[in-house]
Image: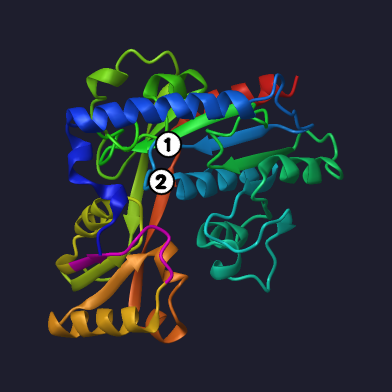
Amino acid sequence: MKNFKNLEFWKHKPGKTFQVISFVYQIFQCLYEWMRTPCTPFHMNVPVISVGGLTLGGAGKTPCTLSLAEWLSNLGHDIIILTRGYKGRAEGPIWVGVSDTPYSVGEEAWIMAQHFPVLISKDILKGALYLQNFLPSNKNTVILWDDGHQYPKLYKNIALIVSNTQQWFGNTWVFPAGPLRESLEGGMQRAHGLIILYSKEPKKLPGYLVNLSIPCWSICCQPVCDLPINTPVVGFCGLGNPERFWETITQCELNLKAHLAFPDHYFYKPKDEQYLIHLANKHHAVLVTSHKDYVKLSPAMQAVTHQIFQKISWPLEAQHMILRMLKFSTQ
């Protein structure tokens, strides 16, 4: 099952045809952005921190948002997460409730709602206005906006971009010639900080990132799995960057016998689960997947599948910088 967000040539310089298509795409993108960009974005009465990305998927925004929420919550802040609820049926604005499922609100919103209040709104401005109606002007309240970097109608007190050392920014070309949603230069100009997730050890920045005018933090994203070392496994996922997940499995020191990628944000069907069980039996292995995929499996499938979590540790330099920006934004 081919994942279009993982095209091999996105790692290399694209051909002339894709370069031309990418150029035309950026022209229409600029016109679209100009038409929907207000003269003054809407300001909330509490700080808004955007955790976004420049690539089409698989950067690590959701675990990064959750870890940031946990850290700020431990400091005494009241956290609200604002998201579009991608792939969910709910239009919003609505709060994710106990009766909701990954199918109704999207798996990312549902996972985050197990830890913090989450408001879903396909129209982010409507969601912001909904929140503004009852939010107090309380400096302890912080809104974390999941995947909001490309949306211009709501003001961001702090705009963070997330990437990782397995993916970086691909060949740095805009779709369809590369994995970027917008130009690297344009996206960085609107950001206050760049987060680079790594799993084992930090890596040197690519040449095109060396002279950044914003702070860049290398942050450890450690995979955690309850399986013993060298366990034979069959991995599967529906993520924007499945190769990154296969690498994560090997970093857990598991013996990867086979793997299968599904489309990003995929909802598994009974026939998919049956095939995966057959594949695991064929290789005398156990099934392993990401937490985002695990929550969309049937109870019977969950009983025979192990999951890998991502544990993020924020360095003191990043903590101090974000707290300074947060303090400045509330003055």
Answer few, some or many: residues within 10 Å of disc 1's Cα (few below 14, many 20 plus, some between 14 and 19).
Answer: many
Between 287 and 311, the one lying in front of the other is 287
One can see residue 210 in this view: yes
Q: What amino acid does circle 2 point to?
A: Gly
Name the residue rendered at 42%, 13% in the picture. Answer: 213
Cα–Cα gap, marks 2 and 1? 7 Å
- Vertical order, 82 against 2 (above or below): above
Query: Is the stretch drawn in magenta largely helix, strand or loop?
Result: loop
Q: Give the range drawn in magenta.
A: 259-267
- Vertical order, 76 against 86 (above or below): above
Image position, residue 231 (x, y; %): 18, 72
* First reached walking from the N terminus: tag 2 or tag 1: 2
**Residue to which mark 2 is pinned:** 60
Between 162 and 223, the one lying in front of the other is 162
Q: Does the magenta stretch include residue 80?
A: no
Q: Which quadrant holds the N terminus?
A: bottom left
Residues at discs 2 and 1 in contact (Cβ within 8 Å): yes
| 207 with respect to 179 (left or right) | left
| 199 with respect to 302 (left or right) | left
| 236 with respect to 107 (left or right) | left
Between 213 and 16, the one lying in front of the other is 16
Dividing the picture into quadrants, the one containing residue 144 is top right
Name the residue rendered at 52%, 59% in the picture. Answer: 87
Image position, residue 59 (x, y; %): 38, 43
Query: In the image, which disc is placed on residue 162?
Result: 1
Q: What amino acid does circle 1 point to?
A: Val
